[in-house]
Amino acid sequence: MYTFLIILEIIICFFLTIAILMQNSKGGGLAGSFGGGNIGTVFGVRRTADFLIKATSYLAAAFIIIALLTNIFFLPGKGAKATDSVIQSGQSSVPPASVPQQQPAPAPAQGQ
């Protein structure tokens, strides 16, 4: 199931990238580079913009939902024994290094 969700996430990511790049920005965007200049002839200019905006919204929502579901329910290693981190346990697995104590320097003699 985990592998299927990851593959689905990659496919959604690919389509989301295409949907974003095909949208026209105020400066023309990258849509002209990928043939997006003629995409308006398929549905009409206004309907194409609406379609791309809705497609981007749905794909982004699906991406986020699948990412959350994968992380919460299907992440590998969830069934294994959970151990506290070193910070949570308050113990260090590495003993502290012994630091040699420095002797205080003698005070300089004051000459009269």
Image (tube, grey):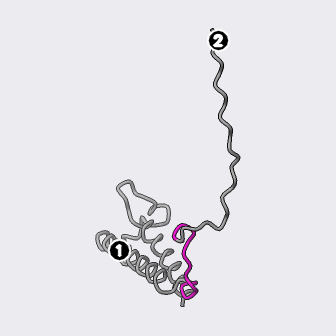
The earlier-in-sequence mark between 2 and 1 is 1
How far across and down, in percent of the image, does residue 112 sit?
63, 8
Q: How many marks?
A: 2
Which residue occupies 44% across, 63% down? 31
Residue 57 circle label: 1
What type is the residue that disc 1 sits on? Ser
Establish if 81 lies above or below 90.
below
x 64%, y 25%: residue: 107
Q: Is residue 49 above or below residue 70?
A: above
Q: Which residue is at a point 66% across and 28% down the rendered structure image?
A: 106
Q: Which residue is mark 2?
A: 111
Within 10 Å of disc 1 (Cα), the crowding (few <14, some 14-19, many 20+) is some
Q: Farthest front residue? A: 112
Residue 27 placement: quadrant? bottom left
Determine which of the numbered discs, if any, sits on residue 33 in the image.
none
Question: What type is the residue that disc 2 sits on?
Answer: Gly
x then y, percent, for residue 68: 43, 79
Q: Secondary structure at mark 1?
A: helix
- Between 96 and 77, the one lying in front of the other is 96
Q: Position of residue 86 (x, y in %)?
A: 57, 69
Residue 56 in magenta stretch: no
**Outermost residue toward the top in this view:** 112
Range of the magenta residues? 77-88
Mark 2 → mark 1, Cα distance in angstroms: 83 Å
Asked whether 87 or 13 is in front, the reply is 87
Task: Tell whether 97 sits left or right of 36.
Answer: right
Q: Position of residue 108 (x, y in %)?
A: 65, 21
